[in-house]
Amino acid sequence: MTSAVADAHEHEHHGPAKGFQRWLFTTNHKDIGSMYLVFSLVMFFVGGTMALIIRSELMVPGLQFVNPGFFNQMTTMHALIMIFGAVMPAFVGLANWMIPMMIGAPDMALPRMNNWSFWILPVAFSMLLATLFLPGGAPAGGWTMYPPLVLQTGDAFPFLIFSIHLMGLSSIMGAINIIVTIINMRAPDMSLLKMPMFVWTWLITAYLLIAVMPVLAGAVTMLLTDQFFGTSFFLAAGGGDPVMFQHIFWFFGHPEVYIMILPAFGIVSEIIPTFARKPLFGHDSMVYAASSIAFLSFIVWAHHMFTVGMPLTGQLFFMFATMLIAVPTGVKVFNWTATMWKGAMTFETPMLFSLAFLFLFTIGGFSGLMLAIVPADIQYHDSYFVVAHFHYVLVPGAIFGIMAGVYYWLPKWTGHMYDEKLGQIHFWLTAIFVNVLFFPMHFLGLAGMPRRIPDYSTQFADFNMIASIGAFGFGISQLLFLYIVIKCIRREGARATSAVWDNPKGLEWTVPSPAPYHTFDQPPRVPQGETFS
Amino acid sequence: MLMIRRLSVYAAGMFGASAASADWALNMPKGVTELSVETYHLHMQVFWWCVAIAIVVFGAMIFSLVKHRKSRGVTAAQFSHSMTAEVTWTIIPIIILLLMAVPAAETLIKIEDSRNPDLTVVVTGYQWKWHYAYQGEDVAFYSNLSRSSNEARRRNSGIDPRTVDHYLRDVDRPMVVPRGAKVRILLTSNDVVHSWWVPDLAIKKDAIPGFMNETWFRAEELGSYRGQCAELCGMDHGYMPVVVEVVEPDAFTTWIESEKDAAGSIAAAGD
């Protein structure tokens, strides 16, 4: 679109400020998106280091490196950092960069709040990480923070609660910003059902965030008052109920699961059509499927708690509702397959990550279906089978989605192609090691190994060794990802065209690469009758 | 140095040692109760459904990946809707789900029927051990991690876990129950939430402070069945195993009488 090029020239004097202040005071969606992405990459490596400490200890039976208390700190912090520090900010970063460009908006609707919602995060995570150096160490009661155990946390306790408040605050502000942007700032002619799938899934995700982050904030505040202000929300001795916390937590926790996967659905729904050279199959049914998943996510929370002793009718309800999620999720997988069907596919790195997402997320979906069956879940619950399941949906699910998105849009951000050969090597290493790492965990869980233990019976030794080898392979492969991204930012690749790929659909491909600091000062025209992606 | 040597020994013997750990397993145990066998079959049924679906879905994807690639010189079709296809792949999964849901619900209803037990044991979780109290029998005791495991588990203990019998899955005093009896377990906790898990009995139930949970089993085969606390309960969560010993009813009667005598003589000695 030539007008966008002209805009870029007109507004050169509006370029970014120089130095540190550019990043501290910026209200530009591209700058803030970049900061979110860099932050999440840093957290990915911090959380990954913790995972490697866990896998080192579990490599062979017996205690070698850490004490059980520190081991529990590592499992707790690994989860909190990966969920709230790596996956969620990465999606918000992608949303910041791409949603305005995809809907033809000049920026996010609430730019100052955008700045604030980012800068809260480094503060929250500095505080959380600082607890590692407090007397008693970091929180060790699991990221699920079940009372009464979490109330045994040392000096770290109030820092844990306050950092979660801050993360929630950041997420809620980010979500409000995304909803307001999508609802109010779309280009004329871009009706809701014409929106690209990434925008759609983020719109749904943002509503989920607004609905459940306050619930988490409420739950942890009740923990805080139980600890310091003499209340007994969750203490049986004072008339409270520890299981009530689990209900409230998972009312947040289950939608949270979809918060971490829906944007990835959106990303692969952008990428597969581009590399299959074919429109997304069933655009509208994809929207309805994502909405159904979001709705169902509110009525299945107790499937995380089938062993707490619920009435039979409750267990039946939550089992049936959970099984129902397989229907819209199946629709999505079938639609992606139908998008590939009779296309003319090529296999650049973003496509490879999307295809691995398709296969491996589906495996995570299968184990999810198995977990819904209550009698079987009684055996699977809190075992390594669950660890395998949620890592399959979060690593080859959410994180492969993010990496696919980064490779897909990196040339648009930097104006240069990443190193395709290295990208493919990174993909194959990652895709092989992720299975070496997580697949054996299914066997461990079925054979009876509980999760969150620092040492295990010798019958579990072989698969733990394999998983640990996979973990180191996976972790080290990600350094290659870092190298590829840095290389691309340093402009060491071929210059990217506006379209970057072979005739991709979507407004972001109509602006030059790199995308100018300001895009769509004038709203673009959306071609009649065309649906994006 | 010792640690490095041990690590290299483990690494070298990793696959060779599989023979030594004979209870090495890939799948869920069938277990020794009617319901554990039913649970196993449910698990396998759903697993095979997943395999069947995977063959169809992954088969279609792989076919497409092989045939519909640009390097073969194909041109992309441009279709993006098919009502027939979309209705089909909504209806068929619903039917499969119904086929899974019915037997699952039937088993669940049986699991929840804890009426008319032959024996009731109150199990209490502590950080980090279990306490068993036989209701109406005046027999109660703590069950701790066995001494040999407890010595070997220390960091740099110098003891190879492979030389310890049932490392981390052995206790000083197991819970003893008679074969064929319906044993009701009443679960609670003294401090934080624990979870009592024995895979061979297909039982996992949370022990919650201030509340009483109920579950049951009827073991059909003699033997020692081992499990662990399944809910994170603090530092030594990994060190509170569960061992249930199933004995003949006669042996059980003898055992419970001797326990009562022992308790009586301790009480008498105390006087």
Image (cartoon, grey):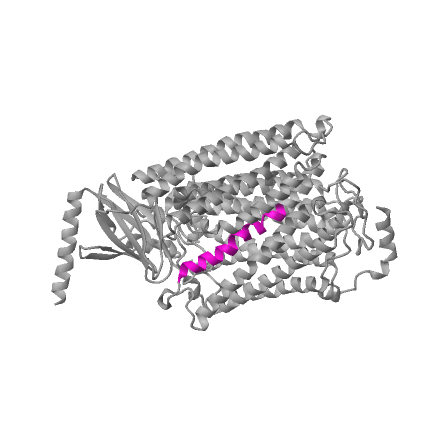
Segment tinted magenta in the rendering: A241-264
Query: Where A338 falls versus A107 (above or below)?
Result: above
Q: Main secondary structure of the magenta part?
A: helix
Residue in view at x 82 percent, y 60 percent: A15
Q: Is residue B196 left or right of residue A277?
A: left
Q: How many marks?
A: 0
Query: Where B246 falls versus A522 (above or below)?
Result: above
Q: Is residue A399 left or right of residue B112?
A: right
User: Percent from the top left, x then y, of residue A375?
Assistant: 38, 43
Indicate whether residue B185 is drawn in magenta.
no
Which quadrant of the structure image shows residue B32?
top left
Tell me if residue A10 can be seen: yes
Q: Is residue A44 left or right of residue B181?
A: right
User: Percent from the top left, x then y, of residue A72?
Assistant: 45, 58
User: Percent from the top left, x then y, of residue A394?
Assistant: 55, 47
Residue in view at x 57 percent, y 44 percent: A396
User: Percent from the top left, x then y, of residue B151?
Assistant: 32, 55
- Camera-side residue of A57 and A397: A397
Q: Is residue A442 left or right of residue A396?
A: left
Tell me if residue B11 can be seen: no
